[in-house]
Structures are given as structure tokens and as C-alpha cells.
Image (spheres, grey):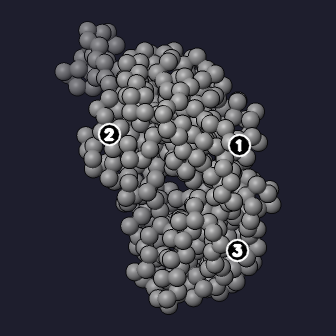
Amino acid sequence: MTSTHAFWLAGRQATGEDSFDVHSPWDGRPVGTVSVPTDEQVEEAVAAAHAVTAEFSATPAHVRAAALDHVSKRLAERTEEIAQLISAENGKPVKWARGEVGRAVSVFRFAAEEARRFNGGEAQRLDTDAGGVGRLALTRRFVKGPVLGIAPFNFPLNLCAHKVAPAIAVGAPIILKPAPATPLSGLILGELLAETDLPAGSWSVLPVANDKMPALVKDERLPVISFTGSDTVGYAIQQSVPHKHCTLELGGNAAAVVLDDWSSEADLDWAATRIATFSNYQAGQSCISVQRVIADASVYDRLVEKVVEKVQAQVTGDPSDSATDVGPLVSEAAAQRVESWVDEAVAGGAKLLTGGKRAGASYEPTVLAHVPDGVKLATEEVFGPVLTLKKVENTDEAFAAVNDSKFGLQAGVFTRNVQTAFRAHRELEVGGVIIGDAPSYRADQMPYGGVKQSGVGREGVRYAMDDYTYERVLVLTGLDI
């Protein structure tokens, strides 16, 4: 028997007329049954968020910060329980799920800290020009209105946290829509928020069906949309509401570049370990998972040998086992898509070095070389445990290969040359450059987002707070300053 999970409507538990079941992608067992809000309940949540905007934005900073601190503390207390839930509904190995809970703990703590600092204002004297004598400008930030946060399945707790925590920090009401495949983690956040003193209506967690989302996206009472997911869906949302503020954190095909100065055995061992780990750590289902390795010819052969060895050492299997490194993808359909892309590349001339087999929703950690141009694996985001290798002759060629992509989220550059590091920062068309490590590194307080078709705007608590607010200037006149 599985339990039926209510959703959270304007701060209170509620159930609708319909429900759907959540199943483990590992073994298909039922994990929970989730109630779905009716159209009338969705309208109630939106109306409540709209009505409470002025009250919530005026809430004292200590009230918002205390609520955020409470959620952070409660997540920490319930880490193991929540990690097991993430693993069950998502298929993520439990050791990575524990890490995700830990990151969400930090996100809410960072948000509490930022809430206490937020909106102190910045004064600017205007008498730098004769027309501004006796005038002082004070600039503060104000919420744009309620936020619609749309979260993906791959980090079902932490990416919900990245929508909710910044909204509470600035006093913007939020309606959170968790992913249909993994709604239970988002509902846990509702459970913890319900323990706080935030105003009724300031938050809702609604597992709305995807086919109901266009109407919600277009609702004029929700002027801010924060979306994490595929580029296809993200840009469709943006195009449907061009007058709204949309933050889009979309896809990538992240590259790890290994240059000629990263050449000792210890250096190559480190690079190979990080590459093998972070091409597979979410079964490759991370926007900054290592998909492409671009290596200088002087280190290529030694690196390839080490990468293949370390990929083969990844422990695959039951995600509830703490020894497991790589679990299943979110669904069998997702694994079948990855399988078809690898098969297409091999048929086109790619050399399969390891992996390449599927069993249900699981796909073996896979490494390929000589992937031909034009196949999906070379141009799209695979979102699976698949790695491609490319040999280049110099740094110019390496950086050109990184930029030869419609995506630009993050890149990792293994170099010890500080000049090359700054050159990478200057030349690589990505939102983040990680020196001496894989592109998969993310600290939740840093600005995170991409360029080109990887999206617009930035996540990271303080940066999302800016996205949810706008500057308003107050000019004081007749002052002796």
C-alpha cells in the first residue's frame, strides 16, 4: 500500500478529485500516490498569491529569515528520510541524494542570510550635476509580483529550493510546480513551510498536470516565471509570454578540456576521476554533466586509458545501496532515447570504448571516440551516462571545439597556467568556467546559468532574488548634503 500525498494550497493541505501514482524507475515499485489540484483549486492558489503580495513583501525581514532558517534546520534533521525519498522517486543513488539534501539545507540557509541583508538601499548624491543640487537618490528593490516556479525531475528537492527560497527571501509569493515524475520531494518542502509563520497564500506547491500549464503560464497575476528544464519547453514558455520576466535554466552539453600542461600521472588521474564521476553521477541527468572531453594530443592517449578504466569502475545498480554510483535514468523511455543516440553515433563511425548496453531504465556508463559531426550525440544534450572523446592539437583548437555548440552552460578546463585560465574566462562562450575540475561543479550561492540556448538569467540565491525584484528610485529634494 502506498500513501496518498495531499498538495499545498495557499499554505494548507488540500486534495483534488484526481490523482496519479509515482513509481521507482529502478524496479517499478509504487512510491506514492499524489493528489492533483482541480482548475478551481489552481485558481484559488493564484488568487491568494496575488492578494497577499503587498502584505508578504512588507513582512519584516526577521520573519522571512526565521522561516527560511526553520526549513534549513528541518531538512537537516530529516536528511536520511528525504534522501531515501529522492532515491525512490528519482532513481538517484542514495549517496548522491544525501548530497542533494545537504545542498538544499545550504540554499535555505543562504536565503535566510540574504533576507536579513536584502533591500537596505543605496544612496546616491545627485549634486554631481548643477541640476541635482540638494537632491539625494535612494534606490531599493521591490518584488515584481508572484512567481511561478517550474522545477525539473533531476534534482527534485534542490531545484525546488532554488525557486522557493529566493522568493521567500524577497517576500514574493510563489507557486511551485514540481516535475510530474518526482513530485514528492517538492511536497516535502510544503510540509516544512507549513510549520512556519509565513502569511497564508504566500506559497503553494501544486502538482499540476503538464497539459494544464499553458493557462497558468499565461496568467497575468504571475509576472515572473522561473523555469528549469529542456530548451524546447523553456523557449516555448518564453515565446508564449514575451512581456513577462522569464528566467530559463536550460540544457547543455558540457565540455571538460584537458590541456598539454596538465600532464603528470597525478594530474591525469585526477582529471580522469572527475570526468568519470561527473559524466555518470546522476546517470548523466545533469545539465552540467560531462558530455564532451576535449584533450590535447600530447595527453590524449594516456587520458583515454585512464578515463575508460575509471568509467568501468563506476558501481551500477540499486540506487538504495550506498555503494552504488550510477542508478537508472528517470524512465525506460529516457534510457531508450539514450540507447538510440549511441546506436546512431556508432552506425555513423564512432568507436565504442566501453558500455553501450541498456536494461530497462538503466544504461551502462558509456565512452565513445571519433563521434562524427552531425549526429545527435555530437550536437544535443544526451542527458544520460554517455561521454565522448575528442583529440585536438592545441589550446586554440580546444577552445574552438568548446564553442562549437548551440549550448553554453559551463566548461571545465584542466590547466595550471593562470594566463590560460583567464583566457578561458574571456573566450569560452559559457556561463561558468571551472579551472582544474570538471564543468559539473556548482556552489549554490554562485551565479549559475548559461548563454546561447542554455537559457537566460541566473540562479544562485542572491542572483535569483535580483530576478524576482526590480529597482525603484526615491529622489529626496531640498536637502543640505
- Could you say whether the residue bearing mark 2 is in a helix, strand or loop? helix
- Could you say whether the residue bearing mark 1 is in a helix, strand or loop? loop
- Could you say whether the residue bearing mark 3 is in a helix, strand or loop? helix
Location of residue 48 in the rendering, given as x and y in whole percent from the top left corner: 41, 21
Q: Nearer the viewer, mark 3 or mark 2?
A: 2
On residue 215, the disc is: 2
Q: Amino acid at mark 1?
A: Met
- Which residue is disc 3 drawn over? 311
Image quadrant in which you'd find residue 379: bottom left
Q: Quadrant of the N terminus?
A: top right
Who's the residue at 76% across and 33% down the image? 77
- Which residue is disc 1 drawn over? 1
Distance from the alpha carbon under mark 1 to that under mark 2: 34 Å
Q: Amino acid at mark 2?
A: Ala
Q: Amino acid at mark 3?
A: Val
The 10 Å Cα crowd at callout 3, few under 14, some 14 to 19, many 20 or more, is many
Query: Does label 1 or label 3 sit earlier along the sequence?
Result: 1
Task: Establish if 126 lies above or below 422.
Answer: above
One can see residue 146 in this view: no
On residue 269, the disc is: none
Task: Establish if 104 lies above or below 307.
Answer: above
Q: Nearer the viewer, mark 1 or mark 2?
A: 1
Who's the residue at 53% across and 65% down the image? 333
Q: Nearer the viewer, mark 1 or mark 3?
A: 1
**Residue extending farthest left:** 131
Query: Does label 3 or label 2 sit earlier along the sequence?
Result: 2
Location of residue 330 in the rendering, given as x and y in whole percent from the top left corner: 59, 59
Judge by depth and name the residue closer to the eye, 88 or 17. Answer: 17
Q: Quadrant of the C terminus?
A: top left
Task: Establish if 135 lies above or below 363.
Answer: above
